[in-house]
């Protein structure tokens, strides 16, 4: 199964709009501290947020993802999030 395309738009401050191709739209808050914890070297915030959504999409369908949440909330549902994002 092919993962749908994810696009990320900066809304300002710590907020991002994430669109999952032909499926859903989400508003995500990602503080600089959380982004620093999970970003890869040279990765911009939009790429980090997109990677977090790829993590989610590997585990659930787009319509099951909350419409608004903070990036660190993912670890509440998937405890291996922190480790997976730094691999």
Image: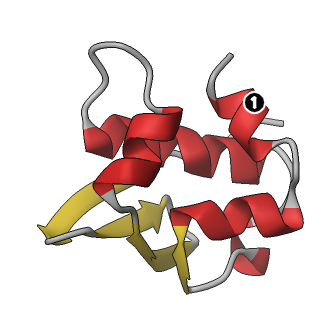
Q: Quadrant of residue 28?
A: bottom left
Q: Nearer the viewer, residue 55 or 32?
A: 32
Q: Is residue 49 above or below residue 11?
A: above
Count of marks placed on residues: 1
The single residue placed furthest to the left in the displayed view is 12
- Residue 45 position in % (x across, y down): 29, 42
- Residue 74 position in % (x across, y down): 71, 62
Q: Is residue 56 left or right of residue 35?
A: right
Is residue 17 something that shows in the picture? yes
Residue drawn at (68%, 16%) of the image: 87
Residue drawn at (58%, 71%) of the image: 23
Q: Quadrant of residue 85?
A: top right
Q: Is residue 58 left or right of residue 48?
A: right
Q: Is residue 70 left or right of residue 7?
A: right
Q: In this view, does 50 lie to the left or right of 42?
A: right
Q: Quadrant of residue 44?
A: top left
The single residue placed furthest to the bottom in the displayed view is 67
Q: Is residue 33 above or below residue 64?
A: above
SS of the residue at dot 1?
Answer: helix
Quarter of the image for the N terminus: give it. Answer: top right
Residue drawn at (81%, 68%) of the image: 76
Residue drawn at (39%, 37%) of the image: 36
Is residue 6 something that shows in the picture? no
Colour mapping: secondary structure
Look at mark 1 in the image and give the residue it sits on: 84
Q: How crowded is mark 1: few (under 14 residues within 10 Å), some or many (20 or more)?
A: few
Q: In this view, does 83 lie above or below 73?
A: above
- Residue 4 position in % (x across, y down): 60, 47
- Residue 30 position in % (x across, y down): 39, 62
Q: Nearer the viewer, residue 32 or 64?
A: 32
């Amino acid at each position: 199964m092919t993962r749908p395309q994810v696009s990320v738009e900066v809304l300002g401050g710590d907020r991002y709009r994430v669109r999952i191709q032909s499926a859903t739209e989400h508003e995500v808050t990602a503080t600089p501290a959380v982004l620093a914890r999970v970003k890869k070297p040279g990765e911009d915030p939009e790429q980090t947020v997109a990677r977090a959504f790829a993590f989610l999409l590997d585990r659930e369908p787009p319509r099951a993802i909350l419409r608004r949440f903070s990036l660190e909330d993912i670890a509440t549902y998937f405890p291996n999030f922190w480790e997976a994002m730094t691999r």
